[in-house]
Image (tube, helix red, strand yellow):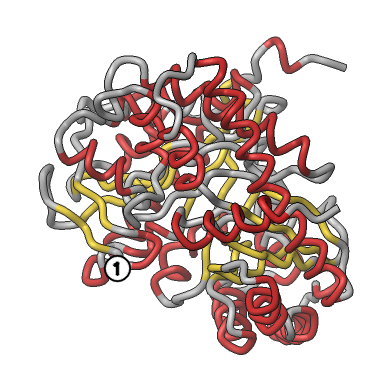
């Protein structure tokens, strides 16, 4: 039976509390587009994406109008392009330009999958793609790239970690006149999920169906507003409140995914119930933590509050949908979260505290601006630390740092839109170069042997 109160509550969440569907992402397999001739492969890829996703944006816009639910982004993810490069050989940047052309044709906000999975080593096409990432991202607007360098089962590929520190720095340098944006479209993973709808890390895993619709919800503002109404609740009562709120948010994502699946004629994959913040006032994960009782995000107690929040969101979400996947939890991107930006500006939030927080949230060090003179070895060390947290804890972690070329601590980098702006944060510049240059592989932890 339809409950009038629930309808009105949802309308209020949308109008006043920044509730939205952050993305509907169509995953498309390119495995049938492989060809020993790279030009033929690119042609097949362009045709398949434009055929499968021809009505993705139109369908999203229609659902938005009919149901009154904002759908902020429409995106596409594809099979890791390193696989295609391994089949065809040739310059992988051709694939990047093909994906960019397809994204422009179908009108999506981003296309992800310029990716390689190298946690156990490099296969044919992997190194070629990784080395091409800076040029590919600098020469495109809609393309996003990711590299998985570790997993709980495989350990950490330290050779890949070293290379990725270099590629992050190169990507920033190639776009230094455009706020180093290429580095903002590149993420380095440990335990990357195959069904993640969020950029920059989305790719279509090889175990996924030929085509699928995945939905990423949002709603930090809704959770913050709910918590603010009950200042005297105990922490377990706050956890229950967040669970109930996450349930309502996820149900909306389930609805949108189901309708989009039916209209597009492709399977519905998952709802990623991550609390994805924006720079907008009132849409911040940091402000939820402060509403719970912290004077400022980054203070003592921040990690504990975030652990409770992340757990409650997951528990509420899984009751609302039988298809929860992706990352699912609470994002803590600095430049994309108004509260995180404020905490970083005033010095309450440090890189070291953010690293501790990533042990209990759903991803890792995200959209963090570091000084432009940060060395590739230090960036590799940051990647290795974050990957170790993911590997040992059996969770997804990631690094998306932007070296702000020509800027120092205290300066700011302005991206605009959902990417927001980021204060340049201090980095420990004691060199890990000897460790990084050892190469090889950090073995998987003992508890990975579960068979």
Count of numbered tags: 1
- Relative placement, left or right, of 52 versus 7 is right
Q: Determine if residue 10 is in view.
A: yes
Relative to 400, residue 136 above or below: below
Residue at the location (53% across, 54% down)?
A: 13
The one of 22 and 109 positioned closer to us in this rendering? 22
Residue positioned 63% across, 48% down in the render: 249
Horizontal relation, residue 127 to residue 260: left or right:
left
The quadrant in which the C terminus is found is top right
Residue farthest to the top? 446
Q: Which of 196 and 284 is in front in this view?
A: 284
Residue at 52% from the left image edge and 41% from the top image edge: 160
Q: Is mark 1 on a helix, strand or loop?
A: loop
Q: Could you say which is closer to the camera, residue 437 or residue 60?
A: 60
Q: Nearer the viewer, residue 8 or 81?
A: 8
Q: Where 272 sits versus 59, above or below?
A: above
In the rendered structure, the answer to whether residue 47 lies left or right of residue 369 reads right
x and y percent of residue 252 in the render?
69, 55
Residue 166 relative to residue 146: left or right: left
Q: Position of residue 441 (x, y in %)?
A: 57, 26
Disc 1 target residue: 175
Q: Where does the image place residue 366, in percent across and percent down from the top left?
A: 41, 44
Q: In which quarter of the view is residue 392 placed?
A: top right
Q: Position of residue 230 (x, y in %)?
A: 45, 27
Query: Please, is residue 35 above or below residue 274 in the view?
Result: below
């Amino acid at each position: 039976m339809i409950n009038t109160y629930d309808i009105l509550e949802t309308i209020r969440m949308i109008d006043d509390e920044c509730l939205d569907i952050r993305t509907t992402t169509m995953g498309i397999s390119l495995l049938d587009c492989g060809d020993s001739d790279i030009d033929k492969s690119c042609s097949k890829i362009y045709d398949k994406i434009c055929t499968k996703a021809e009505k993705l944006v139109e369908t999203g816009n229609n659902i938005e109008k009919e149901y009154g639910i904002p759908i902020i982004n429409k995106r596409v993810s594809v099979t890791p392009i390193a696989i295609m490069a391994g089949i065809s050989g040739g310059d992988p940047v051709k694939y990047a330009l093909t994906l960019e052309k397809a994204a422009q044709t179908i009108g999506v906000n981003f296309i992800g999958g310029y990716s390689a999975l190298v946690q156990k080593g490099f296969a044919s096409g992997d190194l070629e793609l990784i080395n091409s990432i800076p040029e590919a991202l600098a020469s495109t607007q809609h393309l996003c790239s990711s590299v998985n360098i570790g997993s709980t089962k495989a350990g950490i590929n330290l050779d890949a970690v070293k290379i990725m520190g270099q590629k992050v720095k190169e990507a920033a340098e190639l776009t230094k006149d455009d706020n180093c944006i290429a580095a903002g479209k590149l993420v380095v993973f440990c335990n990357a999920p195959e069904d993640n709808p969020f950029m920059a890390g989305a790719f279509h895993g090889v175990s996924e169906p030929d085509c699928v619709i995945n939905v990423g919800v949002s709603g930090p503002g809704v959770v913050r507003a709910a918590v603010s109404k009950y200042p005297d609740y105990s922490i377990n009562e706050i956890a229950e409140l967040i669970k109930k709120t996450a349930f309502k948010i996820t149900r909306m994502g389930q609805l949108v995914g189901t309708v989009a699946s039916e209209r597009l004629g492709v399977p519905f994959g998952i709802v990623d119930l991550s609390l994805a913040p924006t720079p907008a006032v009132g849409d911040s994960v940091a402000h939820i933590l402060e509403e719970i009782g912290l004077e400022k995000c980054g203070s003592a107690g921040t990690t504990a509050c975030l652990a409770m929040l992340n757990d409650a969101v997951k528990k509420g979400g899984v009751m609302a949908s039988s298809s929860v996947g992706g990352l699912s939890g609470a994002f803590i991107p600095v430049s994309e979260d108004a509260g995180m930006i404020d905490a970083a500006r005033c010095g309450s939030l440090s890189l070291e505290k953010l690293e501790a927080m990533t042990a209990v949230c759903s991803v890792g060090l995200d959209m963090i601006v570091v000084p432009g003179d940060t060395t590739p070895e230090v960036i590799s060390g940051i990647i290795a630390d974050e990957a170790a947290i993911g590997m040992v804890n059996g969770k997804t972690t990631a690094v998306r740092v932007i070296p702000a070329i020509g800027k120092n601590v205290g300066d700011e980098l302005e991206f605009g839109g959902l990417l927001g702006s980021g204060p340049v944060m201090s980095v420990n510049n004691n060199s890990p170069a000897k460790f990084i240059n050892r190469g090889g592989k950090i073995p998987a932890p003992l508890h990975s042997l579960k068979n």
